[in-house]
Image (cartoon, grey):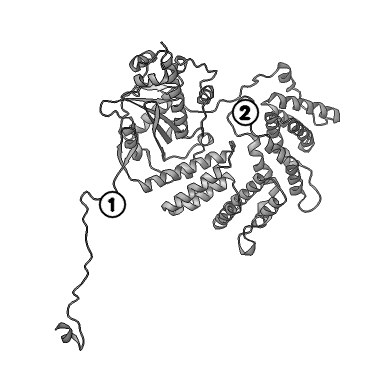
């Protein structure tokens, strides 16, 4: 008899609290176990998500560059956050069984997350409760009849038709894992495994005390060395374009580059770097290949070429005049920005080498590089690019570029480059002015939005946090799936501000309801409130002066 999902909920879930975890970490300089910088937890009952919990954690050490490139949590984001000792009791309250219930902890690669939390708790003289664990990277997937080529969470979500709203954010990863786990449990029940104890016995589930770490870090899977490339094409990479190459050899090289774009070859950048002609000679052939990909609406092919071409754009032949370099760069942008925007983004099935490796796509990064070239030396042009005082405040080359139709992303990236310049020369007040006026002028660069939200929240007031969160949400609304790392940093900023706002509004009592939702402590409400009435008349005593005796009578 086939068991439906609703019937499975009636047999598997009673008395069960399922807690799905995820952690983000940083490497330690002395080689000790990784330290937690963020932890997220999702509580499920009766087949539905009932509560969400997340905390940023100050590990007391700087975040290493590789970890930062993955989760984009910076040292600035963790400044002022609680230590793990401060949040440990809240976390343990989620994991400890109460009133005879059964608690199961789950995660994707659960051994890694449990080992991180176990080590952190040991540093605070606490222990994890010994409860069963489930792993969405283990035999649970096969038992549900799901076949995966790679055991990654993204592949599992894609197979189940689910989406992770913000990969490498602890709460978002926990929510995505919980959604996948609920689907897997339904499928397992429909295949005849509806008894919880029998299922755990069949899976051979370990517990939080016995499970070991499966891996040391969550790193994106790099693209294979020669993945799906014809042997003849791989052999062709051995031919290096010589310094004295003529027009015929350049044309043959351009044809080979086109083949790299069509095959989404991850070695095109290396082929360009090994070419011996001076870079200005390569800009033209690469631009022609890019234009061909744009004409064919080949998104992944254009991204493949763009990654190799953008570093060479500084060698564009300048036009006449004092701003010849700037005008040449902006002319290149004007000719291709609309076509690049129309391409959209690489798909999961057809991605450029960067997207396949889990790195930012060139289609999202090129405006930053081009903006820096178009701006030129910020020491000379930053002041006029965006005026900050007088009647001209909020105008300058930034508004002029927008007026003439320069791509918004290039204008915004150039404005952020000016902010970085003012910070580099320690003119922090001027940088803050540019950030505030730039936001008002419509700049939505993720790093500028991040900085503006930080400025707004600096006062620590509730209204300031709410305004800063609104800024983050407004900027994130235009991200449109961009892989630019600034958007991940902005999401981390929003999580930080939301946590601080919550702690300002609700003081946690350390207690949780049956669904795992924190119960706030009462504020300014004594058990037996006393009402006091103001005195209507006050005896001020005898008055002084000539009428004192009369006043007394």
User: Can residue 200 be seen from the camera position used here?
Assistant: yes
Q: Which residue is mark 1?
A: 524
At a point 64% along the width and 43% down the height, the residue shown is: 368
Q: Which residue is mark 2?
A: 347
Disc 1 is placed on an element classified as loop
In which quadrant of the rendered image does the C terminus lie?
A: bottom left
User: Can residue 78 be seen from the camera position used here?
Assistant: no
At a point 22% along the width and 53% down the height, the residue shown is: 529
At a point 51% along the width and 20% down the height, the residue shown is: 151
Given residues 25 and 106, the one toward you in this image is 106
Given residues 376 and 290, the one toward you in this image is 290
> In the figure, 31 relative to 134: above or below?
below
Estimate the x, y position of residue 130 in percent, counting from the top left: 31, 24
> In the figure, 526 relative to 226: above or below?
below
Given residues 173 and 384, the one toward you in this image is 173
Which of the 4 image quadrants contains residue 354?
A: top right
Which of the 4 image quadrants contains residue 253?
A: top right
In which quadrant of the rendered image does the N terminus lie?
A: top left
Estimate the x, y position of residue 45 in percent, counting from the top left: 36, 28
Mark sitting on residue 481: none
Estimate the x, y position of residue 208 in percent, counting from the top left: 35, 24
Given residues 14 and 33, the one toward you in this image is 14
């Amino acid at each position: 008899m086939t068991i439906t999902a609703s019937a499975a909920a009636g047999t598997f879930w009673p008395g069960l609290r399922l807690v799905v975890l995820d952690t983000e970490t940083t490497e330690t300089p002395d080689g000790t176990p990784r330290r937690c910088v963020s932890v997220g937890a999702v509580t499920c009952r009766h087949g539905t998500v009932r509560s969400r919990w997340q905390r940023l954690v100050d590990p007391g050490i700087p975040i290493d560059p590789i970890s930062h490139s993955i989760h984009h949590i910076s040292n600035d984001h963790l400044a002022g956050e609680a230590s793990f000792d401060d949040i440990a009791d809240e976390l343990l309250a989620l994991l400890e069984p109460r009133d005879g219930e059964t608690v199961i902890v789950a995660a994707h690669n659960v051994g890694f997350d449990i080992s991180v939390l176990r080590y952190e708790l040991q540093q605070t003289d606490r222990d994890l409760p010994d409860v069963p664990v489930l792993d969405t990277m283990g035999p649970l997937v096969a038992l549900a009849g799901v076949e995966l080529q790679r055991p990654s969470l993204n592949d599992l979500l894609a197979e189940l038709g689910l989406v992770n709203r913000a990969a490498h954010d602890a709460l978002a990863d926990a929510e995505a894992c919980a959604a996948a786990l609920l689907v897997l449990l339904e499928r397992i029940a429909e295949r005849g495994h509806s008894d919880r104890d029998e299922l755990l016995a069949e899976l051979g589930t370990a517990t939080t005390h016995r499970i070991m770490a499966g891996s040391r870090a969550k790193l994106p899977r790099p693209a294979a060395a020669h993945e799906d490339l014809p042997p003849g094409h791989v052999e062709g990479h051995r031919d290096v374009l010589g310094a004295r190459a003529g027009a015929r050899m350049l044309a043959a090289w351009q044809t080979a580059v086109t083949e790299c774009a069509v095959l989404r070859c991850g070695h095109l950048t290396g082929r360009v770097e090994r070419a011996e002609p001076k870079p200005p000679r390569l800009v033209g052939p690469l631009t022609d290949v890019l234009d061909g990909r744009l004409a064919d609406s080949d998104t992944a092919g254009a991204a493949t070429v763009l990654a190799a071409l953008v570093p060479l754009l500084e060698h564009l032949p300048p036009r006449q005049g004092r701003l010849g370099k700037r005008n040449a760069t902006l002319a290149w942008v004007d000719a291709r920005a609309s076509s690049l925007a129309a391409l959209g983004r690489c798909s999961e099935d057809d991605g450029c080498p960067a997207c396949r490796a889990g790195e930012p796509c060139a289609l999202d990064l090129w405006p930053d590089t081009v903006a820096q070239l178009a701006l030129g030396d910020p020491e000379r042009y930053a002041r006029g690019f965006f005026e900050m005082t007088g009647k001209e405040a909020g105008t300058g080359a930034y508004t002029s570029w927008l007026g003439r139709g320069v791509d918004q992303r290039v204008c915004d990236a150039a404005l952020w480059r000016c902010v970085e310049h003012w910070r580099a020369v320690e003119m922090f007040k001027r940088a803050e002015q540019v950030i505030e006026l730039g936001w008002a002028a419509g700049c939505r660069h993720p790093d500028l939005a991040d900085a503006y939200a930080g400025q707004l929240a600096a006062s620590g007031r509730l209204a300031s946090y709410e305004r800063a969160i609104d800024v983050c949400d407004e900027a994130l609304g235009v991200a449109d799936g961009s892989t630019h790392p600034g958007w991940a940093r902005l999401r981390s900023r929003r999580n930080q501000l939301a946590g601080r706002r919550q702690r300002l509004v609700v003081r946690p009592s350390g207690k949780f309801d049956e669904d795992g939702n924190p119960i706030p402590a009462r504020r300014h409400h004594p058990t037996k409130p006393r009402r006091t009435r103001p005195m209507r008349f006050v005896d001020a005593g005898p008055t002084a002066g000539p009428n004192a005796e009369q006043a007394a009578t």
